[in-house]
Image (cartoon, grey):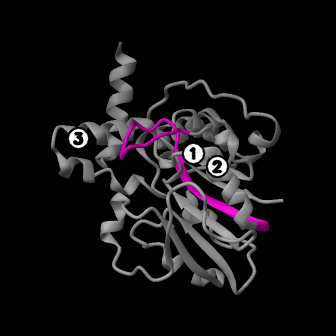
Amino acid sequence: MQVFAQIQGALNDRMLGRSTGSIDLGLRFPDAPSGAFGAAISREPGQRDWTEMIKGLAVPRDGRMLDFGCGASDRRSLAAPLGLTWFGLDVPFSMESTAREDRSAVTFYGGVSVPFADERFDLVVSIQVFEHVPEPHTTFAEIARIVRPGGYLLGSTSFNEPFHSESTFGYSPKNFVLEVTPGIDIWTLAIRRLARQFRHDDAARILAPFFGTTASPLNDLIDECAAKQGVKPVRANALKLELAGQFNFLARKR
């Protein structure tokens, strides 16, 4: 059908950075969910990821931040602007750890029980880690234990993302209820996986900008259709979450 060619052409244009013409697909948008989950879905248009959420968090000066699954420790610089001291936690042989040049303030553990005292941290940041943990219930119980009351859990994790790096679990955005935003869409993630499998690494690298605040092709297309149809951003974001490969979250301990 012609509509499939129209959608594919629009996505390809966005993926390759080509100028895009007007498109009106008459998308069906879900109603914003009710309750705490509906209230958590971002009301902002465009793509807002965890790097935006971290700005201006109400954390005490001289507090502590834990980078849960710190990998190469390349998020150290996030702590100082918030007045926090950075600590890293990782398993000894994570794939990203080979790029770690500075091991100071990094603690290694077995992936289950977290070796820190109760209520030690004001902020826990975890970027694309939860899909790799062996015991999710234990992991979240441990995070709840080490975060002080009023402290935050911030980051991103997989939803519809294809299996990767020995991943073990996928999560529903509904489990994170302070703020939830869609990350890169599942179509773009699948295209990147295909490019890598066909050994076109240069093509896969074209998609790197979409892992952040640059709206990925399907998300951008949904936003454009929402604007033309007069649909509120919260409903557009609800649809994007249904089709997201990853999502961003912000939760707070009571």
Q: Are marks 3 and 1 in contact (CB under 8 Å)?
A: no
The label nearer to you, 3 versus 1, is 1
Q: Secondary structure at mark 3?
A: helix
Q: Contact, CB < 8 Å: mark 2 with mark 3?
A: no
Instruction: For label 2, count other residues whose C-alpha is less than 10 Å away and answer few (under 14), some (14-19) or many (20+).
Output: some
Q: 158 or 192, which lies in front?
A: 158
What residue sits right under mark 1 in the picture? 135
Mark toward the start of the polypeptide (2 vs 3): 2
Q: Residue at x 75, y 80 (%)?
A: 60
Q: Are marks 1 and 2 in contact (CB under 8 Å)?
A: yes
Q: Amino acid at mark 1?
A: Glu
> Which residue corresponds to the image point at 55% horizontal and 24% vertical from the top-left?
26
Q: In x, y percent, where is residue 165?
A: 36, 47
The magenta stretch is: 148-170
Q: Could you tell me residue 171's position as x and y percent? A: 58, 40
Spatial CA distance of label 2 from label 3 is 36 Å
Please give the residue where the numbered disc 3 appears in the rendered image.
195
Question: In the rendered structure, which amino acid carries the disc numbered 3?
Answer: Ala
Q: Position of residue 1 (x, y in %)?
A: 35, 12
Amino acid under disc 2:
Thr
Q: Position of residue 230 (x, y in %)?
A: 65, 36
- Residue 20 shows in the view: no
How would you rate the neighbour count of disc 1 (Cα within 10 Å): few for under 14, some for 14-19, many for 20 or more? some
Does the magenta portion include 160?
yes
Which residue is label 2 attached to?
Answer: 138
- In reply to whether residue 49 is colored magenta, the answer given is no
